[in-house]
Image: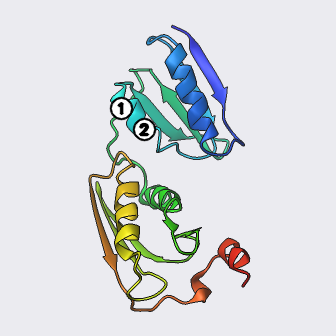
Amino acid sequence: MQLIQLDNRGLQPPEPMIRILEILDTCSKDDVIEALMDRRPMFLFPELEERGLPFTCTPNDLGGFTLRIGDPDTAVSSENTMPAATLEDDVRTVLSNVIDPELGIDIVSLGLVYRIDIDGSRVGILMTLTVPGCPMSASIRSDVESTLRSLIWIKEVHVELTFDPPWTPERLNAQARALLGR
């Protein structure tokens, strides 16, 4: 058995995931990989489960996470065992990959996500769109559902659209304001 240590801090996605997958493809099944990460690499979890690899991902003292792959003595299930605030952060992070196709900006930066409810492996999203009757509503809703299901601990997703209160440009974060010239 060999311990392979990686420092993936400071790398932009998807580079940390690519580095880990490349090592997994070349190392022995008995090897253990320990990687320092800035964020929880939740998109990697389904791949690790599919390969049947035990893993843990825990907060570390450096302000990030330590991902440990291949050590059966420390592995835990993919069940939702993180504090609610961390889980909500994971949901927001993954939702930032859902792009409004008309504006080209993610739905979190646009301020479209009003509320996130987490109950075990069930996640409810209350969100809006920039305008009622948006022709892209079905597509955005589908993207939200499929993106959330990429988190291994989520088994059920419910997305509710509301227009009360209606969306206004004041909900934009600073990055979205800059992109839209506001």
Q: Residues within 10 Å of mark 1 (few under 14, many from 20)?
A: some
Circle on res. 69: none
Q: Which residue is mark 1?
A: 49
Q: Which residue shows up at 33% across the image and 36% down it?
A: 77
Q: Mark 2 to mark 1: distance in Å?
A: 6 Å
Residue 28, percent across and down?
Answer: 48, 10
Residue 173 as seen in the image, left or right of residue 119:
right
Q: Residue at x 34, y 61 (%)?
A: 145
In the rendered image, the residue lying farthest to the top is: 1
Report the side of 80 relative to 169 (left or right). Answer: left
Residue at image position (66%, 35%) is 8
Q: Is residue 142 above or below residue 41?
A: below
Q: Quadrant of residue 61?
A: top right
Q: Is residue 120 visible?
A: no
Q: How many marks?
A: 2
Colouring convention used in this rendered image of the protein: rainbow
Q: Nearer the viewer, residue 129 or 40?
A: 129
128 over 59 or under it: above or below? below
Identify the residue under disc 2: 45
Q: Is residue 10 left or right of residue 27?
A: right
Q: Amino acid at mark 2?
A: Phe
Callout 1: SS: helix
Numbered disc 2: secondary structure: helix
Q: The C terminus is located in which quarter?
A: bottom right
Q: Amino acid at mark 1?
A: Glu
* Image coords of residue 59 (percent x, y): 55, 43
Visible residue check, residue 130: yes
Label 2 close to label 1 by CB (< 8 Å): yes
Number of other residues with Cα within 10 Å of mark 2, as a class: few under 14, some 14 to 19, many 20 or more: many
Judge whether 77 appears above or below 4 on screen: below
Residue 125 is situated, as x and y percent measured from the top left of the image, at 36, 70
Asked which quadrant contains residue 171, the reply is bottom right
